Image: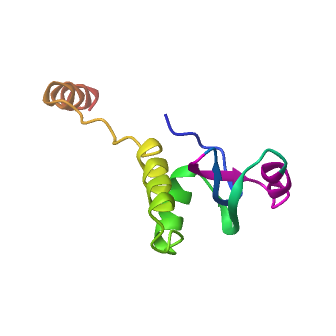
């Protein structure tokens, strides 16, 4: 399930041949990534604090991947994992019951 936590900084890094989206609340995260052996680190300040789903949309909108397949795949994976669930459809029986209850109340 998607989280509603927000982040001010986002980007990518590569660790053990895998490129993933990284999140932080300040750019000091770069030091930790370097210390832990990450390479190809690229973090940007976001225009406002965003959820992971919003970050996926933003990185796509600004063409953050810029033709880099590994980054495109990381953004696509983030978007897939953080889709907002659709509002459940109301069944016909529920609509009928609600309409009946409203008619009785009047």
The residue nearer to you, when weighing 40 against 96, is 40
Q: In the picture, residue 43 is in which quadrant?
A: bottom right
Count of labels in the image: 0
Q: Is residue 99 left or right of residue 45?
A: left
Q: Is residue 101 above or below residue 14?
A: above
Q: Vertical placement of 37 versus 71: above or below?
A: above
Tell me where residue 68 appears, x and y as whole percent: 48, 68
* In the foreground, 104 or 18: 18
Q: Is residue 21 magenta?
A: yes
Q: Is residue 81 above or below residue 105?
A: below
Question: Could you tell me which residue is drawn at 42 percent across and 46 percent down?
Answer: 83
Residue range corresponding to the magenta coloring: 17-34
At x 52%, y 75%, the residue is 62
87 on left or right of 99? right
The quadrant of the picture occupied by the C terminus is: top left
x, y percent for residue 37: 76, 47
**What residue do we see at 15% from left, 28% from top?**
96
Which corner quadrant of the image does residue 94 belong to?
top left
Residue 11 highlighted magenta (yes or no): no
């Amino acid at each position: 399930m998607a989280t509603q936590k927000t982040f001010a900084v986002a980007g990518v890094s590569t660790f053990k041949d895998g490129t993933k989206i990284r999140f932080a609340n300040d750019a000091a995260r770069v030091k930790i990534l370097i210390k832990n052996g990450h390479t190809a680190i690229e973090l940007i300040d976001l225009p406002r604090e965003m959820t992971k789903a919003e970050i996926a949309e933003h990185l796509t909108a600004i063409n953050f991947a810029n033709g880099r397949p590994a980054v495109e795949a990381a953004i696509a994976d983030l978007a897939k994992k953080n889709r907002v669930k659709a509002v459940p459809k109301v069944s016909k029986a529920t609509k009928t019951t609600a309409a009946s209850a409203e008619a009785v109340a009047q």
